[in-house]
Image (cartoon, rainbow, N blue to C red):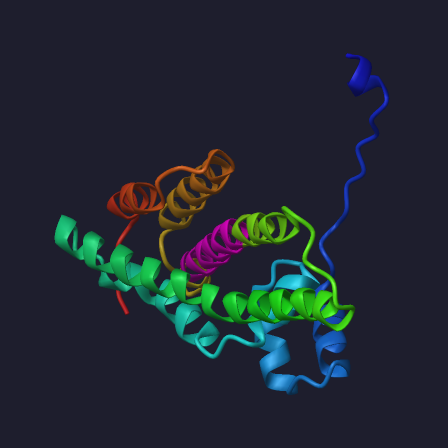
Amino acid sequence: ATIESRCVRVDFTAVPVAAIEERLVADGVDRQVAAVAAVAAGGSLARARLLVRDPALEERRAAWYGAPERLDGSGHAVGVVVDELLDLVEGVLAPLSEQQAEEVERFLAQYETAGMDVPKGQLSTLEQRHKREARKVRTDELRSGLAVLVGRYRDALAGGGPAGDFVTAAESVQQLCDSLTFNPNARLALESLFVGLPRLQG
């Protein structure tokens, strides 16, 4: 209670997609690449700057969007789709690893230039932060993919599909997104989700 009484909650709204896109373009990013990254960034400029370095971004989004059409009611189909999606999610860590390697290089260079030894524990602290960043990027990518998945059912609804399919998908995805706070087993969580999702025709 003592700590809580000295705390203030500050909520930040997501940065608008248009603002992120313009910032990326100002940074020198191609307009088309910036537009895709801005939509996928979930309101985060830092995530958008990571995604513009990821050549597989559009491939991942297309895979999530097309997933419902590959469901045939069998557990095998669910397993195949989930495995492919998780492999693609791991792919987003490649540009992050490059970014982090550059940071480590700059970190070590500043001490080398000054002719000093790296303070004990400093490099370990940096590596631990990088691990936390990797977990967050992985979770953010899952949320982004799930948003694309719901978008597929929304488009089906707009095209005259059953409202119940959209409601089922939206509610199931929301439950999974809420559970990500507790760091569940991603594979099991996605398999459970896809087993219950309505199948869509291409």
Q: Residue at x 81, y 13 (%)?
A: 2
On screen, residue 1 above or below 26: above
* Image position, residue 149 (x, y; %): 41, 58
- Is 99 on the left-hand or right-hand side of 159? right
Q: Is residue 195 visible?
A: yes
- Is 105 on the left-hand or right-hand side of 177? right
The one nearer the camera, 118 or 38, is 118
* Image position, residue 24 (x, y; %): 71, 77
The one nearer the camera, 156 or 55, is 55
Residue found at the very far top of the displayed protein:
1
- Is 170 on the left-hand or right-hand side of 70? right
Q: Residue at x 30, y 47 (%)?
A: 187
Our reading of the magenta stretch's main secondary structure is helix
- Is 165 on the left-hand or right-hand side of 38? left
Q: Is residue 138 magenta?
A: yes
Q: Is residue 74 visible?
A: no
On screen, residue 71 above or below 172: below
* Image position, residue 8 (x, y; %): 84, 30
The one nearer the camera, 158 or 127, is 127
Q: Which range of residues does the magenta coloring cover?
A: 134-154
The C terminus lies in which quarter of the figure? bottom left
On screen, residue 78 above or below 23: above
The N terminus lies in which quarter of the figure? top right
The one nearer the camera, 165 or 103, is 103
Q: Is residue 72 magenta?
A: no
Q: Residue at x 65, y 48 (%)?
A: 120
